[in-house]
Image (spheres, grey):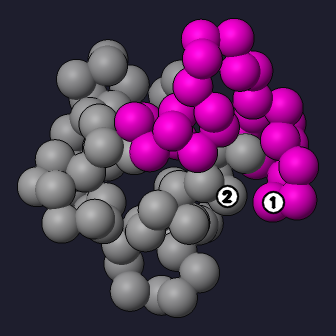
Amino acid sequence: MVVKVDANGDGLIGFDEFCILCQAMDGGDASGTKFKEDDGMNEEEELKEAFDVFDIDKYGLISFEESGSVLCSLGLKEGTR
């Protein structure tokens, strides 16, 4: 996941890269998404909230270790869904 969205090659996922990843996973693209706004939050607020879950150390970047930790806590392991 990190390698696929790491546009600048720093080994970390910034918020902009995270947004692109989420939009692609939701069937949208960088120019228009399919996020639902039924809870009063706009798309950027929803994405920021999701980003913050992965940004464990709160440095504003998601490392490979942070993404792995969150995904494991959700019961997802590498190579499985």
Look at the numbered disc 2 and give the secondary structure of its residue: helix
- Camera-nearest residue between 1 and 30: 30
Picture quarter containing residue 62? bottom left
Q: Are marks 2 and 1 in contact (CB under 8 Å)?
A: yes
Q: Is residue 78 visible?
A: no
Give coordinates of residue 77: x percent, y percent. 36, 31
Q: Is residue 75 magenta?
A: no
57 left or right of 60 in image: left
Residue at the top extreme, as displayed: 38
User: Disc 1 residue type?
Assistant: Ala
Q: Most extreme residue toward the front, as rendered?
A: 40
Magenta region includes residue 27 = yes
Chief SS of the magenta region: loop
Mark 2 or mark 1, earlier in chain:
2
What amino acid is found at the position of numbered circle 2 in the picture?
Ile
Q: Which mark is residue 20?
A: 2
Looking at this view, is 58 or 81 the one in front? 58
Circle 2 Cα neighbour tier, 10 Å, few/some/many (<14 / 14–19 / ≥20): some
Neighbours of disc 1 within 10 Å: few (<14), some (14-19), many (20+) = few
| Label number found at residue 15 | none
> On screen, 17 above or below 76?
below
Looking at the image, residue 41 sits to the left or right of residue 50; the answer is right
Question: Which quadrant would residue 19 be assigned to in this image?
Answer: bottom right
Q: What is the magenta range?
A: 24-50
Determine whether the residue tagged by mark 1 lies in a helix, strand or loop: loop
Q: How many marks?
A: 2
Q: Which residue shows up at 47% across the image and 62% down it?
A: 15
The residue labelled by disc 1 is 30
Q: CA distance from mark 2 to mark 1?
A: 6 Å
On screen, 40 above or below 22?
above
